[in-house]
Structures are given as C-alpha cells and as structure tokens.
C-alpha cells in the first residue's frame, strides 16, 4: 500500500467521513506532533461502527447503556485505523481536530492546536493487529514527509500528554515496533 496526502490535506486512500468536530488551528500553528489513541464502542467490541458515528455526530446515545456519558460529546480524530488496517479520515490534517482535550507536551498546553490525532480501533486492555501496526507506520512516515515540522521523536500516546487522565493506547501498544520501523525508514534519508 502507498499513501498520499493531497492538496486538501486528505489521504487519497482513506475513506472520507465528514465531521464537524474541528475548527481552524490558531494563527501560525502547524502540525508538530502525532498523538496515538484507541477507541472502541462498546469498549472492547470491534466493527460496530459506533466510534465513526460518535466522530460524525451521528451516535444515538441510547444504543448502549455505556454510551450515556457520550451525550453532547463532540470529538473526532483526524484519522481512525480499524482492526483490518483500513484508514478512515474525519478531519483534514491542516485543521484542528478535537481529539486530545486538556493536554500538555513539553510544556505546551492544548495539543489539539499543533497535533494530528490517530485513533486505533482497540482498547487499553487489548493488543493491536499486525495490519494496524503496518497502516500506522506507513501513515506516520507519510505524515513526517508531508509535515516536516513533525519531528521523528514527536509521536506520542494520549497517555503521554494527558497522564493520569488518559491511558490510551495502553500498555500493550508496542512502541518499539513503531520506533524501529521509523528509524529504519529515516536512516534511508541520511
Ligand atoms: Zn485518546
């Protein structure tokens, strides 16, 4: 698979699902950080389509008892990678998607302003699929090329920018896989 970002800051290969859960980045702000999350609704159940409905404002919160606290919640990542490694995009990369909430990276608050949010379909207590790692690594490499102000060391978990409040993508997410592939790839360019 090859990924390409077009002039509208969208992935040509991703299924586009329009969301209203974004606004403009502040003047002068650009993407400098990638934040990895996980989501499943209900928690631990996959392929339900409910996260996509949440991100596009179409979730019926009466669908499941655990959705009650999602009433009025307006969130979306830029992209989501499902268990098969397929990528859906909700917000263009140059816009500010509402994914990180109260957060801080290297002393800078409000990470939504300068980050790209990637949701993996998953749960904090679960592991991720090989297809998800492959798609994520390819996506991160593509983003680093398209947005050079993102450093190779600026790929973090939601847990890293909102410690104590957020635990995703969880202890079973294998950062070494991602970092190793990134380093392999980047070393081709030095
Ligand atoms: Zn998160």
Image: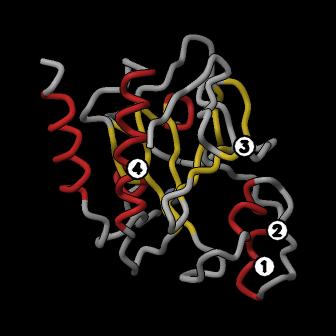
Give the residue at the far bottom of this rendering: 65
**Circles 2 and 4: CB distance less than 8 Å?**
no
Q: Nearer the viewer, residue 124 or 106?
A: 124
Q: Which mark is residue 176?
A: none
**Circles 2 and 1: CB distance less than 8 Å?**
yes
Give the SS element for disc 4.
helix
Residue beneath disc 2:
71
**CA neighbours of label 1 inside 10 A, class few (<14), some (14 to 19), many (20+):** few
Vertical position of residue 47 compared to residue 26: above or below: below
Q: Earlier in the sequence, mark 3 or mark 4?
A: 3
Q: Earlier in the sequence, mark 3 or mark 2?
A: 3
Give the residue at the far front of this rendering: 1
- Which is closer to the viewer, label 1 or label 4? 4
Give the SS element for disc 2.
loop
Residue beneath disc 4:
136
Q: Earlier in the sequence, mark 3 or mark 1?
A: 3
Q: Nearer the viewer, residue 133 or 77?
A: 133
Q: Earlier in the sequence, mark 1 or mark 4?
A: 1
- Which is closer to the viewer, label 3 or label 1? 3
- Which is closer to the viewer, label 2 or label 4? 4
Q: Position of residue 77 (x, y in %)?
A: 61, 47
What separation in Å lies between label 1 and label 4 (alpha carbons)? 30 Å
Query: Residue at horizontal 79%, vertical 43%?
Result: 18
Give the SS element for disc 3.
strand
Q: Which mark is residue 68?
A: 1
């Amino acid at each position: 698979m090859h990924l390409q970002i077009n002039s509208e800051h969208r992935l040509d290969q991703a299924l586009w699902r329009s969301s209203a859960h974004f606004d403009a980045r502040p003047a002068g702000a650009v993407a400098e950080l990638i934040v990895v999350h996980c989501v499943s609704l209900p928690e631990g159940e996959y392929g339900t389509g409910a996260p996509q409905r949440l991100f596009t404002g179409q979730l019926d919160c009466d669908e499941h008892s655990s959705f009650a606290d999602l009433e009025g919640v307006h969130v979306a990542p830029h992209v989501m990678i499902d268990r098969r490694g397929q990528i859906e995009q909700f917000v263009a990369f140059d816009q500010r998607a509402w994914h990180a909430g109260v957060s801080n990276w290297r002393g800078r608050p409000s990470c939504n302003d300068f980050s790209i949010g990637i949701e993996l379909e998953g749960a904090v207590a679960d592991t991720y699929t090989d297809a998800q790692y492959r798609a994520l690594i390819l996506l991160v490499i593509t983003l680093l090329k398209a947005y050079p102000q993102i450093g190779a060391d600026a790929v973090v978990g939601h847990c890293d920018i909102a410690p104590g409040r957020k635990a995703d993508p969880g202890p079973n997410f294998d950062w070494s896989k991602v970092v190793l592939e990134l380093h392999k790839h980047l070393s081709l360019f030095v």
